[in-house]
Image (cartoon, rainbow, N blue to C red):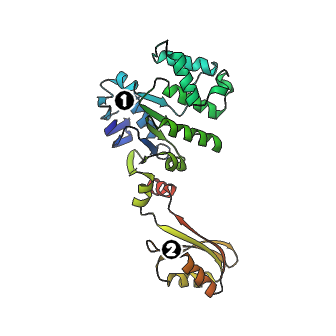
Amino acid sequence: MIEINNLTKKFGSNVVLDDISFSVKKGEILGFLGPNGAGKTTTMKIITSFWTPTKGTIKIDGVDVMADSMATRKKIGYLPETVPLYDDMRVYEYLKFVAEIRGIDKNRIKERMANVVNSCGLKQVIRKPIEELSKGFRQRVGLAQAIMHEPDILILDEPTTGLDPNQIADIRDLIKKIGEEKTIIFSTHILSEVSATCDRAIIINNGKIVAEGSPENLVREAGGKEIVYIKVKGPRDAILEKFKEMDNIESVEYKDKEAENIFGFNVIPKAGVDIREQISEKAVKNGWNIYELYRESVSLEDVFMELTK
């Protein structure tokens, strides 16, 4: 569906994208991750023909974006980070305007508007001025304009920026619903959104792709290990040594202190071993009161921070 090869973008001597290549399959939802300034927005603006690359090629359904940008633009719906809305228009006026400039047959505009309003949950605000809308509804209107012409591909740049948790959940569900029929690339800083929504993720840093794969595989390939956290009351150094002597433990490290003689430790077991019962028995045997004991795994956020720090 989308093929990007050796994409490079320079602004003077500043290299924003450095020879990146990736593809997106039809019907796939791809999360595009990276810190501020990593090159996410630049990549999206080049795919959508807002900017031209310094080097490299982009093909949409086999058509080169640089050779025939008008043909490829028809296949793409774009929601930039700053939603392109006209505050003095009412919602229905704006959507009608978008339908007209997108060249939708005038006999189909009413039907198409009704479908988009229903898909994006805009019925209750359809006659409101855009300037009166909440941030969440503004994002919904932005999505509505992006899908008005029934594109095969959606490019969404930070679609949940500035939303509250309920609004984020609504937009996430909307993206998943739309993604049942379309190919989607969206950038975000909210890594839980990637795990919940995306089939695959790409992490970009300093203009280079540093990781690619499903959220689960990214964690696995990064060597994500299980960690057991235990907080106990007792002599810190003695606890540390006793835990290190135990079987099935790869390493132990002092993590934090809650109060006098109450310490937390991260215990990393050997692969596939549940050591919670073993270390709790060790603590009880030595007379150390247990305040906390739980197991956790390395998250996508941990992987992201490690790859982009």
Q: Which SS class for mark 1?
A: loop
Please tell me whether mark 2 sits on a helix, a strand or a loop.
loop
Residue at point 64%, 77% (across, down): 232
Within-10-Å neighbours for mark 2: few <14, some 14–19, many 20+: some
Q: Can you say whether 296 is above or below 277 in the image?
A: above
Crowd tier of the residue under label 1, counting other residues whose Cα lies within 10 Å: few below 14, some 14–19, many 20 or above:
some
Where does the image place residue 152, in percent across and percent down from the top left? Answer: 41, 30
For marks 1 and 2, give the one nearer the viewer.
2
Instruction: Name the residue located 45 percent from the left edge and 33 percent from the top edge.
Output: 154
Q: Nearer the viewer, residue 77 or 80?
A: 77
Direction top: furthest residue:
106
In primary-sequence order, the first of circles 1 and 2 is 1
The quadrant holding residue 123 is: top right
Instruction: Please give the residue where the numbered disc 2 appears in the rendered image.
Output: 274
Residue that numbered label 1 is attached to: 52
Which of 136 and 236 lies nearest the eye of the viewer? 136
Where residue 241 sits: x, y (%)? 54, 84
Query: Could you tell me the amino acid type at mark 1?
Result: Thr
Q: Is residue 100 above or below residue 134?
A: above
- The picture places residue 44, in percent across and down from the top left corner, at 43, 35
Image location of residue 163, percent across then percent down = 62, 40
